[in-house]
Image (tube, helix red, strand yellow):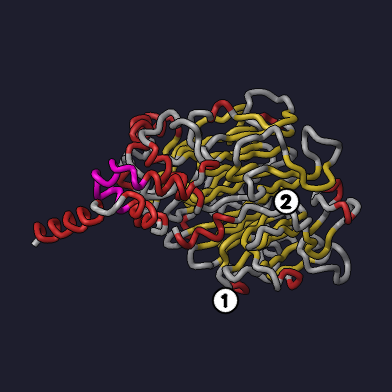
Amino acid sequence: EGGVVCARRHLRMASLLSMPHELLVLIFLDLPTRALLSLSRVSQRLRSTGVLEEALRRRAGEAWLPTSLPRGEASWLSLLFWLELRRKSSRQTLAGGYDHSVFISRRGQVLACGHVEGGPSAWRSPTSLPSLSVRIHSVSAGSGFTLALGWLGAVFSWGKCTHGSLGHGNLVRQRTPKMVEALRAVRVEVLAAGEHHACAASREGMLWTWGSFEERGAAVTRAREPMPFGQLRDRDDEVAIGQTSTVTSATSCGAFIPARRASSTSSTADESAPTSPPTTLSTIRALASSNHTLVATGRGALFSWGRRGALGHNGSGLVPERVVELVGERIVAVAASPSHSLVATVAGALYSFGSSEVGQLGHCDWEPQELPLRVMSLASVAVIAVAVGDYCSFALSDDGDVYSWGLSPSLGHGQHGPLDVEQPVPRRIDALRHERIVALAAGPSHALAACADGRAYGWGIGCDETLGMPQLGGGDALLPVSYDPRMRIDVTSFLLASSC
């Protein structure tokens, strides 16, 4: 019976390959990425015809591709599949820093406003950075510095360099974007900027950290350039679980291996990784950093480390540990502030933990939560994205509504009494109810949102032109205010994700 099935499969493949080349290309142009991956895996002959490569090149467009095959890639087909999946992955095309805001335009250009190195004292409206000539995939903003991730995995940084937060091996301010040389040979998937430190993750699950933050006087991160911190893997059978000296934490959904062991166990895999099309986008799905760091793996396991109080566990904070309270949940979105954390599951459930001194956890009280607790007032809402400020929280639902809670005036509800009013219960931002919001970001006291058509909104404290809205005169926006409609944000991946 198995032989009959195999014969039928070969017959169907032979019929497919007998079609004209151009017709096959046109057919493949409309197939889902997963279907193309399946075809590639089952037929060496199909891979050798060049049909798959041509279809993927047309879908990518020449603007997405390098002129020559990058070093370390085994084939164009492997690279094209990786880029195809990357287009539909979770991205960060908006970012809020301590005194600036960053955007990615439809052309992949970085726009910035507020206190931006290389510009005037404060850029009054979003302005492109001409010195950054590559197409950018994601951005993240910290305390006076910015990180940008190129489509091919290169990392750029600029701004203040407190404690080495730029990763260039020194403490010198960088007025224009500069590639982080220590990560040149690393295919970075996701990155996050904290207050004075940063974290990046490669597609093999290796974590790299630089800058500085401490927990109980011990340096969790203290480096002026990226250093390998350790590796997160999604399956226990990929590591020696019995060797407790090398595995910091392990569960049925993942394990953390310190860098001293991860480098030796992954060196061989790194060389062979590009030889076949990827079956998943990345070992790391989401990353968020402030005074602590949250990491969600591709299978949804949540790890955290850093300053204690908002980790979701009572561990030391010195190394990544699994948030065991969320075992069984698949985490797809994370956000971290200096005092609290938000995470969302694939089913749309929202959990929060940490400080709630102004109601920023959303539990209708002001009690701190060391362990994750579900936000029950949003139990009927499917949350797909989260963002946090210092004392405020935001959640985006699958139908495009934005909810906020915590401390005004950053919530976007307008002024209803004193500016420092506390809102411990999530409330929909009614000013955006007629818009379909698809992307969300927040700085310490301001927030940004992008609509499905690429238009952007901002609100919160706008002093020092943080929001980049000249009409405010450097003042605050208590309700969402639209940016110039000619500025359109790249929201392609948010609209394509469901088709992957």
Task: Examine the rendered structure and indicate whether residue 412 appears above or below residue 223.
Answer: below
Q: Residues within 10 Å of mark 2 (few under 14, many from 20)?
A: many
Within the magenta stretch, is there residue 387? Answer: no
Q: CA distance from mark 2 to mark 1?
A: 27 Å
The answer to which of 153 and 336 lies nearer the viewer is: 153
Q: Residues within 10 Å of mark 1 (few under 14, many from 20)?
A: few
Residue 71 lies in what quarter of the image?
A: top left
Q: Is residue 139 left or right of residue 275?
A: right
Do residues under tags 2 and 1 come within 8 Å of each other at their CB atoms?
no
Q: Which mark is residue 443?
A: 2
Q: Is residue 196 left or right of residue 331?
A: right
- The answer to whether residue 256 shows anywhere in this view is no
x%, y% of residue 264?
37, 29
Please tell me whether mark 1 sits on a helix, a strand or a loop: loop
Q: Which residues are magenta?
A: 38-52
Please tell me whether mark 2 sits on a helix, a strand or a loop: loop
